[in-house]
Image (tube, helix red, strand yellow):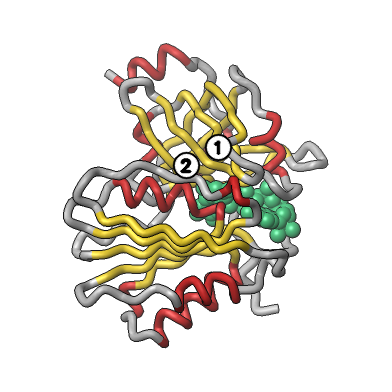
Amino acid sequence: MCQANYAAKVNSLPDDSTLELATRLGVSAHVARVASTRQLSTSIAQVVLEADPALAGVPGNDIMVRVRDAAGKFIRRRYSVRAVDPDASTLTLWVTTDHDGPGCSWARHAQPGDLVDVVGPRGKIPLNLEADWHVFIGDASGLGAFYRMAESIEAPGRAIFIVEIDHDDDALTASFDEGIGVTGIFVDRQGRAKNDPAGLLSGLAAFEFPPDEGHAYLFGEFSTIRALRGALLDRGLDDERISSKAFWRAGRTNAEHGEPDKSEN
Ligand SMILES: Cc1cc2nc3c(=O)[nH]c(=O)nc-3n(C[C@H](O)[C@H](O)[C@H](O)COP(=O)(O)OP(=O)(O)OC[C@H]3O[C@@H](n4cnc5c(N)ncnc54)[C@H](O)[C@@H]3O)c2cc1C
């Protein structure tokens, strides 16, 4: 029913390159329509897309959005799905907008009715259903994924958020079911470099691991995520209980397919 509903709303076909990409990845390609946009805070804009809800996959998944770079060339950017409404056939994204880049520019200027090619679902980091507690660590770019994942935790699970922010109003919150223990630690960056892990490392140091089984999810800046993974291993968390994904890299634009530069220098 949802699919028929969606098909009735958007009749355009994605670009051939989008269809080819989706075929290669074994996922779907669609043309989504921007339903609404809203600046939620200094650094985060919400973009709601009318799109096939199947694109949302599971909590932790993302979609690839086709945007234009400054030269007018089409490239892709990946955005985690913050929320999905199967009845309305909408996907909600939280996009960071406090820097200059093609993805940021798309989110800032998107207007209701705009059409955009999307590919999804993407992503390999779902919630670990075996874990008793889940710690989500990163920056504002991870907040949408963190909250969607945490909203899928079943009682009596625990969610702990350690998130570095640049502005007080970026400390966006979410509501969770009763029976879920929630702890939020927002760390003020205080002007430190974007790839300086000191703030999140001190936030992590202040968090005492509960005695039962936990899982850590790290989403954000490349070097910071790497340092956090090391700190968690040093604290004795097993490698398989740490899921990390670099979303962007300080001082470098993401590649045309949306991935940050992962080179050593
Ligand atoms: C799997 C995956 C999921 C992602 N999910 C989300 C998401 O839900 N929300 C989200 O906002 N982003 C998310 N990202 C990151 C997103 O895809 C883009 O990389 C990001 O929006 C920057 O793209 P851009 O085109 O605006 O800037 P780029 O062209 O990539 O970069 C331009 C400049 O801006 C800097 N920059 C990029 N991002 C930031 C930032 N967040 N803060 C400060 N400076 C930055 C870069 O270092 C560079 O100097 C995800 C990335 C991946 C790989």
Quarter of the picture holding the N terminus: top left
Residue type at tag 1:
Thr
In the image, residue 210 lies at what x, y percent? 26, 73
Give the numbered dot on residue 58: none
Residue that appears at 47% across and 42% down = 22
Q: Which residue is mark 2?
A: 22
Label 2 CA crowd tier, 10 Å (few <14, some 14–19, many 20+): many
Quarter of the picture holding the C terminus: bottom right
Numbered disc 2: secondary structure: helix
Res. 18 image quadrant: top right
Q: How many marks?
A: 2
Numbered disc 1: secondary structure: helix
Q: Is residue 257 visible?
A: no
Seen as rendered, the residue at the extreme top is: 8
Query: Observer-nearest residue: 252 or 167?
Result: 167
Residue type at tag 2:
Ala
Residue that appears at 35% across and 15% down = 5
The relative height of residue 51 versus residue 67 in the rendered view (above or below) is above
In the image, residue 103 lies at what x, y percent? 66, 43
Residue that appears at 58% across and 48% down = 170
Label 1 CA crowd tier, 10 Å (few <14, some 14–19, many 20+): many
**Do the CB atoms of the residues marked 2 and 1 lie less than 8 Å apart?**
yes
Instruction: Say whether mark 1 is within 8 Å of ligand 1.
Output: no
In the image, residue 33 lies at what x, y percent? 54, 23
Left or right of residue 49, residue 126 in this image:
left
Q: Which residue is mark 1?
A: 18
Q: Is residue 82 visible?
A: yes
